[in-house]
Image: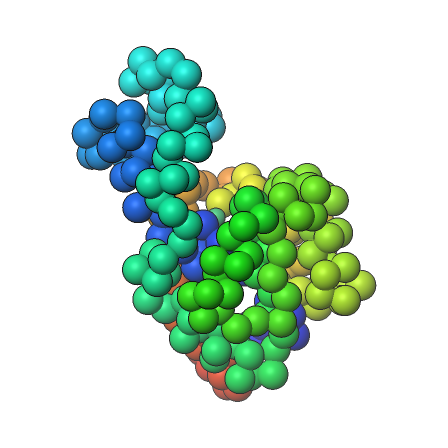
Amino acid sequence: MSLPPAICLDIGEVLIDETRVWSTWADVLGIPRFTLMGAIGGAIARGGDHRDAFALLGVDGWAAREPEVQAVYAGFRSEDLYPDALPAVAALRASGRRVAVIGNQPARRREELLALGLDVDVVAMSEELGVEKPDPAFFTAVTERLGEPDPAAIAYVGDRVDNDVRPAAAAGMTAVWLRRGPWGVLGEDVSGAATLVVGSLSDLAALAVPGAAPPSG
Ligand SMILES: [Mg+2]
């Protein structure tokens, strides 16, 4: 398939490897990292919210520890970027496509991403938009921020079937499922909403080269 002229990338587990933030949560709460990561996977596999892991582990009042976690985490760092993130963005833009980065994140992540060298056409965080995935209004906001009224001209690339793939397809976009991170590995696209399934952003960028074959597997 050929990619549409505008590509909107999710952030967590698409551009950013969230290992460090969940390691920070484990450290602050005094839970072994392996235990928390495993419990998060279990919560996702049960079809629940990943934060159900805290209840599973008997952690009360975890939400109140958020400021402490964020202070230790101290925002995105270069080491949090998946190695293919910036090269894939550059390749997609070099192919003449417009690239946006819009995901469910606090507003301050915008400046953090720009400081890591992210060079795209549009950057917006859900907090500044006032709406989060999977709300259909989020995907309307994507079309508005890209200045592209036709959703069919946009591919939304995300790791989650529930938050990214299904609502993007419902909005009329090309839904690209990036199967990395726990949601990407454990999820099932039972409704077949994904137009395209890739294992990395490198695979996606390879499709931007004219005459490229689709990724195998
Ligand atoms: Mg994500």
Kindly indicate the quadrant of the structure image that contains residue 15.
Answer: bottom left
Return the x and y of residue 43 as percentages of the image width and height.
38, 27
Q: Quadrant of the C terminus?
A: bottom left
Q: Is residue 106 left or right of residue 128?
A: left
Q: Position of residue 195 (x, y in %)?
A: 57, 58
Q: At x 29% / y 30%, what residue is drawn?
A: 28
The residue sitting at 45% across, 41% down in the picture is 188
Q: Please, which colouring scheme is shown?
A: rainbow
Quick one: quadrant of the N terminus? bottom right
Number of numbered discs present? 0
Residue at image coords 45%, 24%: 63
Snapshot quadrant of residue 82? bottom left
Percent of width and height locating residue 46: 40, 25
In this rendered view, identify the residue nearer to me: 207 or 69: 69
79 relative position to 10: left or right: left
Q: Left or right: where does residue 34 sit relative to residue 212?
A: left
Frontmost residue, 189 versus 202: 202
The residue at the point 44 percent across, 56 percent down is 14
Whether residue 145 is visible to the viewer of this picture, yes or no, is yes
Please say whether residue 185 is visible from this viewpoint: no
Q: Say above or below: 58 vs 47.
A: above
Determine whether 201 is above or below 131 in the image. below
Q: Is residue 83 above or below residue 93?
A: above
Seen from this angle, which residue lies furthest right? Answer: 149
Residue 70 locus on image (x, y percent): 41, 39
